[in-house]
Image (cartoon, rainbow, N blue to C red):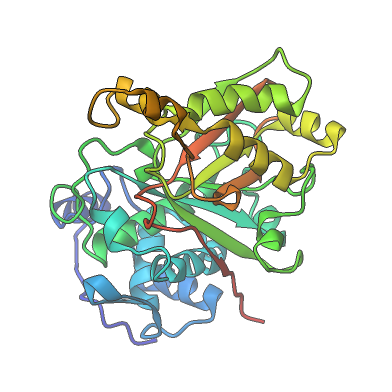
Amino acid sequence: MQLKSRHYDAPDMSEALDLCYAKGWTDGLPVVLPTEERIGAMLAAAGLDPDKQVAFIENRQVSVTAEKAAINAVLAGCKPEYMPVIVAAVEALADPLYGYHGPATSTGGSAVFMVVNGPISRELDMNCGDNLFGPGWRANATIGRAVRLIMRNTIGTLPGELDRSSLGHPGKYTFCIAENETESPWPPLHVERGFKREQNAVTIMAALGVHQFSNGLSSTPEGVLTTACAQMRISAGTGRQPQYALVFAGEHMAIMAKAGWTRDDVRRFCFEHTRISVAELKRIKLKDGDAGAEDEATMLSLVQTPQDFLVIAAGGRAGSQSAYIPGWGGKAGSQSVTKEIHRPS
């Protein structure tokens, strides 16, 4: 195996780690040293030659090779078997629908939210349950981290330089979950997006932070969703996000299942009940001017169509909490993208 990246020598582990910090290759947390053996194991797990182009980021004119992706996967602490998921996520980053430059450089501070579907999520022991967005699972933590390190080290999306986030959020370290396909009241997300159940896929979305909502009073979908919609209406300004992810945990999933609600039922309800008047937007200073009588009757939708809500089943079985995640950008902003995860035979 012939690697093209520059090699560095260090007398011991401590100095090698210091070199990684000095070169700016870390996200602030310690990294695993990318030795030639570890890089080779990553490439073998994905069945890729080092110089294979994984993605080309058009608006940055940057080619992401398999070698560069593998180096960052090692830095992030990934196991070799995680590499195919990372490759698919990077392919999605380069999709024109995602539109890399906008979400990567905006002051709005989005992260790459990733949802993994298919048998691979269970084989890799990815978390789809308790503490869904929290720590504790190597696959979730390091796969998401690897994608961010590729953005940083290969594409050049450095904080304060290309990445101009005013605030950012913790999802910019890692923002990766699996869907709870076994207990979901709906077909898996990737099936809805055109793949077969037995295929493996990853969906990415340029996303703001997680907003948790609680409703332990309602035993109907209408009651649970009324709470969610009330919070979403003013969460970030109607019409500013192209998509929203809705993540339903165990108790709320069970309520949807008992009532026989489909994803389309959830979407239609949320689309209708997140509408807000121009007058209210003016009163809360999300639109300019004074509210007039005509503004009271002029209603705007949170997203353009009901299909712009991504409905996901994941989270702990106990507790009356679920979450919504606003997407990034205006009406023509970044769109979610799903790519198949390929593994060598």
On screen, residue 240 versus residue 162, left or right, reads right
Residue 313 seen from this side:
no
Judge whether 241 appears above or below 290 on screen. Answer: below
Q: Residue at x 27, y 47 (%)?
A: 27
Q: Nearer the viewer, residue 152 or 192?
A: 192
Position of the C terminus by quadrant: bottom right
Q: Residue at x 69, y 68 (%)?
A: 195
Q: Residue at x 33, y 72 (%)?
A: 68
Q: Position of residue 309 (x, y in %)?
A: 57, 46
Residue situated furthest top in the rendering: 217
Residue 255 image-quadrant placement: top right
Residue 122 seen from this side:
yes
Residue situated furthest front in the rendering: 293
Q: Nearer the viewer, residue 230 or 189?
A: 230
Q: Nearer the viewer, residue 209 or 122?
A: 209
Count of labels shown? 0
Q: Position of residue 210 (x, y in %)?
A: 46, 34
Residue 167 image-quadrant placement: top left
Q: Nearer the viewer, residue 212 or 230?
A: 230
Position of the N terminus by quadrant: bottom left
Q: Position of residue 43 (x, y in %)?
A: 47, 76
Residue 152 image-quadrant placement: bottom left
Q: Position of residue 13 (x, y in %)?
A: 27, 53
